[in-house]
Amino acid sequence: MKVRAVYPGSFDPITNGHIYIAERAAAIFDEVIVSVLINERKNASFSVEERCEMARESLKHVSNIKIDSFNGLLVDYVKQKEAGVIIRGLRAMSDFEYEFQMALMNRQLAPEIETFFIVTDPKYSYVSSSSVREIFHFGGTVRDVVPSVVFEKLTSRR
Ligand code: PNS
């Protein structure tokens, strides 16, 4: 039986840390859907189309990864996609509390869906979308921590 997994997130923007997790998930599961949250409060830096396009471009080398977007409850989306697994990346213990709570909440909502944690490479342990946005905003370089399509997109906004 083929196992499909969903890797959800804001991906605002996608970073090399996300790419690392998506690649490792794709090596384990038959199909991985990287799915971008459509933020209803409209406070994202990039539109959902831009976030999907950056993810699509930076993961096009992995044949069993698809890019999609979702809104509403994650577990409803996972069921709709007939996936059995939610992928989440862990960078540090500080991520764990939030992730553990989310995994338990999702289990309460849909016990048949498994949350699968993948630990990051230590070289990405400090990388987050929010720090990328902030460093770039204040003129720092983020070239080494984001895919080139994201770096170009950021630079085009200057
Ligand atoms: O990249 P992020 O922002 O850490 O991802 C968080 C995300 C998108 C996985 C989470 O906010 C989510 O699943 N949102 C959808 C709404 C939902 O199902 N919330 C209940 C989770 S406990």
Image (cartoon, rainbow, N blue to C red):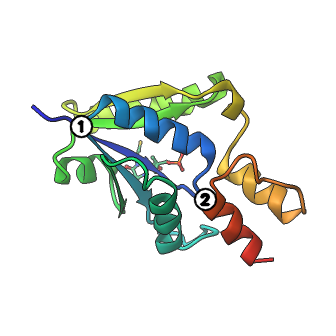
In space, the residues marked 2 and 1 are separated at their CA atoms by 25 Å
Q: Quadrant of the N terminus?
A: top left
Question: The residue under label 2 is which amino acid type?
Answer: Pro
Give the left or right position of residue 107, taking residue 24 as reference.
Answer: left
Q: Residue furthest bottom?
A: 157
Q: Which mark is residue 13?
A: 2
> Under tag 2, what secondary structure?
loop
Quick check: is the Cβ at mark 2 less than 8 Å away from ligand 1? no
Camera-side residue of 101 and 46: 46
Callout 2 touching callout 1 (CB < 8 Å): no
Q: Residue furthest right?
A: 139
Question: The residue under label 1 is which amino acid type?
Answer: Asp
> Under tag 1, what secondary structure?
loop
Q: Measured from the top left, where is residue 62 in percent x and y? A: 39, 47
Q: Residue furthest front?
A: 61
Q: Is residue 27 above or below residue 81?
A: above
Give the left or right position of residue 155, taking residue 83 as reference.
Answer: right
Identity of the residue drawn at 33% across and 49% down: 63
Q: Earlier in the sequence, mark 2 or mark 1?
A: 2
Q: Label 1: few (<14), some or many (≥20) within 10 Å?
A: some
Q: Measured from the top left, where is residue 18 in percent x and y? A: 54, 43
Asked if residue 72 shows in the view, the reply is yes
Q: Is residue 23 above or below residue 114?
A: below
In the rendered image, which residue does mark 1 sit on? 30
Q: Measured from the top left, where is residue 158 in percent x and y? A: 81, 77
